[in-house]
Amino acid sequence: MGTATLLIVLNLFGMFPGYLSFGWVADHLGRRKSFVLYLFAAAVFVPLYAMARSQAAVLVLGAVVAFFGTGFFSGSGLIGSEIYPTRLRARALGFTYNGARALSCVAPWIIGWVGQSKGLSWAFYLCGGAFFLASMMATQLPETKGKRLE
């Protein structure tokens, strides 16, 4: 299996359905529960993915990690638009999106350093830990399902 095949499988069977499903799940479970679910599932599956040794496990677990690990991004605009009042919304979303991008610019360096010094599995465990912390932080989000926008 080549890299292109792996990326196509992850995109078609993991990321794309994850992006599409988040809104539906958020409409049924609520925004906060959906974020917690997706982030916690990613926290569980990323370390399992690090332990995968067969091609089948890499494909299946990779698609599951891609589903949850990227699916929650679809909710960022959703919950951000519902949390911030109209007069601040564009500025607040720009700040939070770009602030997160600025902070995440160190992630490749950290993951590379951990992977090189401790092994690639430890880099995955670190990502799983970050997803877990994010899921715990998501428990503090206000529930905005069904609320009128200000």
Image (cartoon, rainbow, N blue to C red):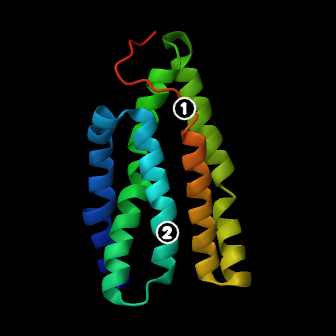
Mark 1: give few (<14), some (14-19) or many (20+) Cα within 10 Å. some
Total label count? 2
Image coordinates for residue 46, horizontal then vertical, percent? 49, 68
The kind of residue on which mark 1 rests is Leu
Residue depicted at x 54% and y 48%: 135
Residue depicted at x 69% and y 67%: 109
Name the residue that disc number 2 marks.
46
85 displayed left or right of 15? right
Real-space Cα separation, disc 1 to disc 2, in angstroms: 23 Å
Image coordinates for residue 131, horizontal then vertical, percent? 56, 56
Quarter residue 97 falls in: top right
Residue depicted at x 37% and y 33%: 30
Mark 2: give few (<14), some (14-19) or many (20+) Cα within 10 Å. many
Q: Is mark 1 on a helix, strand or loop?
A: loop
Residue closer to the observer: 16 or 52 = 52
Name the residue that disc number 1 marks.
141
Q: Do the residues labelled 1 and 2 touch (CB within 8 Å)?
A: no
The kind of residue on which mark 2 rests is Val
Residue depicted at x 59% and y 46%: 136
Up/down of 113 relative to 68, above or below: below
Mark nearer the N terminus (1 vs 2): 2
Image coordinates for residue 101, horizontal then vertical, percent? 60, 46
140 displayed left or right of 42? right
Residue closer to the observer: 1 or 122 = 122
139 displayed left or right of 42? right
Up/down of 64 relative to 52, above or below: above
Q: Is mark 2 on a helix, strand or loop?
A: helix
